[in-house]
Every structure is written in C-alpha cells, then in structure tokens.
Amino acid sequence: LSSRASAILRPLDIPLSGEIAGAYDGSWKGSGDILESVCPSTGEIIARIRTASPSELHETLDKTRDAYKHLRALPAPRRGEILRQIRESIASKREALGALVSLEMGKIRTEGVGEVQEFVDICDYAVGLSRMMNGRVVNSERPGHSILEVPNPLGVVGVISAFNFPVAVYGWNFALSFAAGNATLWKPSPTTPLCAIAVTKLIARVLEVNDVPGAAASLVVGGSDIGEAIVQASGVDLVSFTGSEKVGREVGRAVQSRFGKTILELGGNNAAVVMPDADLSLAVPAIGFGAIGTAGQRCTSTRRLYVHRSISDKVLRALSGLYSAISPGDPLESTTLLGPLHSKTAVDTYVTALTSLRASGAEILSGGDDLEPLPAPLATGNYVKPVIAIPRTHDPLKEPWNKELFVPILNVAIFDHLEDAINWNNAVPQGLSSSLWTRDIRNVGKWIGPSGSDAGIVNVNVGTSGAEIGAAFGGNKSTGWGRESGGDAWKQYVRWSACTINFSDNAPLAQGVNFSI
Ligand code: NAD
C-alpha cells in the first residue's frame, strides 16, 4: 500500500493488508465475494473487502430487528444522548474521515471534510429532535373524547447509498432513524466500502459503551445482489434509497409491491438561470462551483445553464475564464479544486458525451481538448477537463438536455424571457435543484411561486449545489419525491397512529350515527 493511502487508513483503524470484513451486526464478518476499493486519483487498489454472503445478510437482518426492539424501549432523549456521543466521535475524526472520502471517492479534501461535517450537523439536529419528535392532540367532535396522533418507532430502516456522498447520505438517514428509535442497516456503494467501514467502527464503539446492540447500526458491504435482497426483505420497513433513476425505479416498484415504505433520492438535472440584472461577481463563481465541484458528480451539480441573451457574451466569457484557471489534480492537495472522476466507466461516459456533442454540431467553449498527462502516481487516475458546451439545438426532452450524465459537462442555452427559462427548467423529467440569479424581486416571486421552478430545491442567488442540513433535502418528479435531513423529513422514520380515547361514560358514534340495539 502506498504511504499516501496508509497514512489515511491508519488513524481510522482500517487494516493496511489482508482482507477486511465488510459486514457488521455486533461482530464483524464477511464470507462473500471479494470487492476491491480502488483510489480514483491513482488507480491504486487500497483494500480488499469481504462482502456479506446471503446467509450473513439474513442473520444480520434478524439481529437488526432484535436491536430495534432494544432501541424502541429506550426513551427518545436517551437515544439523543447516544447520538450526541456518536456526533463527538465522528467530529473527532473529521479530518481523517474527510481525507478517506477524498482518497476513496475522489472529491477534493475540503469537500470530503465538509461531507463529514454534514454528518456532525445532522447529529446535532437529531439530538435536539430527540426531545421534539412530538405527536398532536386533535379536537374530537364527541364529548369526553380525545384524539392523539402518536409517532412510534418504525422498525428496520435499510439505507442503500450512492458512491458520491459515501458518508453524509448515511448520516442524514442514520441520525433521524436512530433518534426515532429504529435500527438501521446500511448497504453502501460497492466502490466506497472503506468510508462505510470507518464510520460504522466509530458508531459501533459508542453503541458498545452504551450497552446498545451493535446491530442498531448494521453494515453489509456488497453489490446489487445484496441491495436487491434488502429491497425484497419484508423485515425492512423503510428502504431509503439514494442512487440513479434507473435503479431507483426498480427499487420503488419492488418495495411498493410488498407495501413497504420508501424514500427515493434519485438523479438531478439541475439548471441555473441568469437574468440581466444578476450580480455576476456572485453568479459566475457559484455556477463554476456547481458545475465543476465534485467533478460534476453531485446529484445537485449544475448541468444546464440558461443565460439571458443581453448578457450571454459577458457571462460565457467570464465562465470560460474561470474554467481555464482550473485544472485537475490530486484531490488530497489543498490547492486542487478539481479531482478525478470516480471510475473509468465515468470517463467513458464523458468521452462518449463529448463525441456526441461534437458530432451534433455543438460549440465547445471550454475543455474538450486532450489533458496533459499528470505526474505519477496520478498518471493512472480518472482525470478529465470540465466542459462548457452550447448544443446546436435546445430541446429539454432530447439529449443532451434530458439526462443526468454525472460528469463535468455544462450545457448552455440562451433565452429572451424568464418564462421560457422557467419552462425549460421544468421540462426535463428530473426535479432536484434549480437556481435563479437576479436582484429583481418580481423575478424571485415568479421563480418560487406556482408558475415557477418545479424542483425540490429552488434557490435564488445561491447555486444548485451545497444544501444545508436544516431544510428537507430532495427532489420531485423522476428524482423520486423523497425528503431527507431537515424539515419534516423525520416524520417518515416513524409509524403514525391516530388514537381516539374515550374518557366518558357514554360511547357516542362519530357523525352522530345512531346504532342503538
Ligand atoms: P447506483 O444507482 O448505481 O447505485 C446506488 C446504490 O444502489 C448502490 O449501493 C448500488 O450497489 C445499489 N444497487 C444497484 N442495483 C441495485 C438493485 N437492483 N437493487 C438495490 N440496490 C441496488 O448509483 P451511483 O452511481 O452509486 O450514484 C450516482 C447516482 O446517485 C446519481 O444518479 C446521483 O444523482 C444519485 N444521487 C442522488 C442523490 C439525491 O439526494 N437525490 C444524492 C446522491 C446521489
């Protein structure tokens, strides 16, 4: 193992050689297939992980169910206190975990650390929530009656997550699920197993100290077969799935067919709209971060840019200037702003998309030419240049506009009226994030109102990416309608009962129905 990788793995208690167990339910195990964790910035194999076998998965599911029975008996504020300790444990390894995210996923270090901070933030939020997950008292129409709406723990929450946020997405789900009194079973992306193992180790230690069964935060590293088995398992009450639209559609159908609950957080195809009165000193860097940040691999990455004709030359000149100042490099270096793509497959997607843009007559404003080879050990990494393209035609229902490619290609179109830009913003199948740049309050009203953006995230003078944990996060339409993190998201992690209680000596029927015998 390179000294670069071992320096990151060592403080997180990850073995530097041999096969690493990838399943945890109170004890570590794994006798399934071997899975390799490959560093996207160098191509180095950084670990070999033993996945969970089908029988181990079932054993883990049983233990997770038992852990739920333990957790649901703990008062919610006590669960909050344990979460507070988990928060401290994760925060104490903020830098180390952030570096691991950077090493294994490929995003730049500051974004890796930021992602760990999101885990810390959502723990803080859920600690508070553990004293505020309240139901309601509803007025009854019958004398001497009360109606209570009561939230109770749901059961087992299965979290199936994507490669691009290998720590934060689990954090959003785990913190709310745990505070609500559920046991959580995590199946991370098969390409970011070490992040999942490191986080689970930190949580497991806290659970142990507090005499909570380790299966309250179970882990099963594995591929789509393990994911499918979780989706099918009737003992998983809620499947929180983060990933592509293609897989999400199958997951949604399968869970629905057994009447389970889902939270679906699927692909985005996010647009930024720039009005003539926009402050370009804010808009251009934010659009640059939205499109180039995480090498275009955020669900909220800016993929479409709609610029008003009157300022299009100025905006595109400034944006091209910003692009030419950024070149890919080692994501672990503090000066790097653009790391590699996560996989070789993503590089192929990028090359195919660029070829097709060129073939269809698109103007390539930035990027697209060959990348100078990077020095060893980066020469074998998945680096590409970010691209700004003006496709020949704009049809939001056709390629390249209607798809999320998850690579740093920004497609641009010019508009004359805000209404057109809003229609274009809304015309694609996805509905995750959107961003308007303007100083005119009338435009803001249109954008956030009933005829405005139909996305789950509707920003003004803020880019499409980089959400905070306080608001409910998620998208509409083919993004899956899921909401996680803040807002009312916690309400999905409990089962609600309406309890009508009769304190009187009579038993009147509702609506005055007379059924006297
Ligand atoms: P993916 O769909 O390939 O995989 C996601 C997860 O699903 C992985 O853990 C994978 O092993 C598992 N999986 C694959 N097939 C399965 C099956 N048949 N049944 C059950 N599980 C299965 O996605 P990815 O490439 O890892 O991630 C990128 C995608 O995730 C992008 O589309 C991105 O927009 C999306 N994403 C969305 C959000 C959001 O909040 N909306 C956040 C992050 C990522």
Image: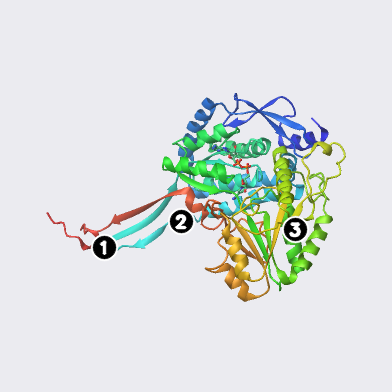
Foreground: 103 or 499? 103
Can I make out residue 27 in this image?
yes
Q: CA distance from mark 1 to mark 2?
A: 24 Å
Residue 314 on image: x %, y % = 78, 68
Report the residue marked by disc 1: 142
Can I make out residue 105 in this image?
no
Which is nearer the N-term, disc 3 or disc 2? 2
Residue 204 on image: x %, y % = 60, 37
Q: Amino acid at mark 2?
A: Asn
Report the residue marked by disc 3: 288
Q: Nearer the viewer, mark 3 or mark 2?
A: 3
Secondary structure of the residue carrying numbered label 3: helix
Q: Is residue 429 left or right of residue 386?
A: left
Q: Amino acid at mark 3?
A: Gly
Secondary structure of the residue carrying numbered label 2: loop
Secondary structure of the residue carrying numbered label 1: loop
Foreground: 424 or 65? 424
Give the number of the disc on residue 309: none
Q: Residue at x 58, y 71 (%)?
A: 446
Report the residue marked by disc 2: 134
Q: CA distance from mark 3 to mark 1?
A: 60 Å
Foreground: 273 or 83? 273
Which is nearer the N-term, disc 3 or disc 1? 1
